[in-house]
Amino acid sequence: MSLRARINSPEETAGRGEDGHLVASYRAKLLEEIDLAEMSSLAAAERRARLERVLGHIISREGPVLSTVERSQLIRRVVDEALGLGILEPLLEDASITEIMVNGPDAIFVERGGRVEQLPLRFASNDQLMQTIERIVSTVNRRVDESNPMVDARLPSGERVNVVIPPLSLTGATLTIRRFPRSFTLQELIGLGSLDDHMLYLLAGLVQARFNVIVSGATGTGKTTLLNALSGLIPEGERIITIEDSAELQLQQPHVIRLESRPPNVEGKGQITIRDLVRNSLRMRPDRIVVGEVRGGESLDMLQAMSTGHDGSLATVHANSAEDALMRLQTLASMSDVEIPFVALHDQINSAVDVIVQLTRFADGARRITEVALLESHGSEPYRLATVARFHARPMTADGRVHGAYEHYPLPRRTADRLYMASQPVPQAFGIAQSYDQLATREAR
């Protein structure tokens, strides 16, 4: 969209009464006083600063007389609607908001601290909402219209955006913006109550000893946050390849190659899938492969990589329990274009997966590791998980919080031996199981 079109868009100010007319009036005056050619050559931050300065001079010269707060609000609103995303701009700048959900022009919800709340904001009209959506998707060279009513993209600033418009959405144009917080270390996650010290020592040992780890959980449980924290434990000398649909991981090691899938263009061509990237990554001499989320046939390629020399890899999967995660992986692997019997996929998972870390989001919005389980089965044996840590939640208290305690169990001998050979200690809180019967008795409880 051209600069003139952005500043002089009547739909964006329609429907707001006197307030909207005031914004439209100052937008028109702003257009008269600026040099569009010069403005187009400026960076986004400089352009905003210049517009705010020019608009401030106009208000000082022509009125109305406003308090300092009112003046700042008016300048902010005119410039936001001219160059930014209008009423969404303050929400994007609010660090406490992790998700913005627009359900048509009249319903705007946000997620703060794990809880969803509706805000007393609305778009002036459906046209204004559509113009905001078009402005967002245009920044990533995408378009949304009746022939292409769904868009899933990542903004240059890192947010993940999903758009669905009519006729697919019966409630009007729908916009979801997911913001990703800064990366957290496992130590910081302890402070947030997501795990305890003993679990940190165990997970650090498992990653350093090159166990293959699957992080499992439902939507919004913090899988990517935990995956990022776990990947921070990988030694700096290793070559790491990250593969994601939308680049969210923020690894700090010096030898990291970040790969991101690509959707098809408007002609339906040029798509690069997660599976394409996983296959290609095997030719790039990786020490570790980190897959943001497996959700299709790439699960098979990931499992094969894990069981053929790429130990220590990490991935996430959508599942509600550790047992569900294994079945989910098996189902996803069967979706590849290679026809493999379920029995063979079962063997592949037993060979490839070492650890399942299960995450749960509780009613108070807290996200916690609720189980760490080790896959102890081999070959065609039925899946056998040994739970070594579990969070036991207590009923919600009067202040709306969910509290609980972590319980730790002895590690299987085979796991303890692998940790020993990698010079990683067995945390005292866990100890070592003396026999399989001890593990079986524990699981039966």
Image (tube, grey):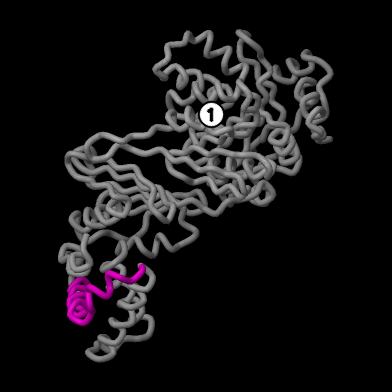
Q: Residue 326: x and y, percent?
A: 55, 21
Residue at image x 22%, y 37%?
267
Residue at image x 27%, y 39%?
265
- Amino acid, disc 1: Leu
Determine whether, in the image, residue 358 is placed left or right of residue 187: left
Residue at image x 61%, y 50%?
252
Looking at the rendered image, the quarter that the N terminus falls into is: bottom left
- Residue 87 falls in which quadrant of the image? bottom left
The relative height of residue 267 versus residue 85 in the rendered view (above or below) is: above
Q: Residue 247: x and y, percent?
A: 46, 45
The relative height of residue 396 versus residue 409 in the rendered view (above or below) is: below
Q: Please give the residue where the numbered disc 1 appears in the rendered image.
A: 282
Residue 262 visible in rendering: yes
User: Between 276 and 176, which is closer to the camera in this rendering?
Assistant: 276
Q: Is residue 36 magenta?
A: yes
Q: Residue 203: x and y, percent?
A: 70, 36
Residue 117 visible in rendering: no
- Residue 396 falls in which quadrant of the image? top right
Seen as rendered, the residue at the extreme bottom is 61
Determine whether, in the image, residue 380 is placed left or right of residue 77: right
Magenta highlight range = 20-43
Q: Residue 291: x and y, percent?
A: 52, 35
User: Between 120 and 133, which is closer to the camera in this rendering?
Assistant: 133
Q: Is residue 125 magenta?
A: no
Mark 1 element type? loop
Residue at image x 47%, y 20%?
333
Determine whether, in the image, residue 32 is placed left or right of residue 216: left
The relative height of residue 170 versus residue 175 in the rendered view (above or below) is: above
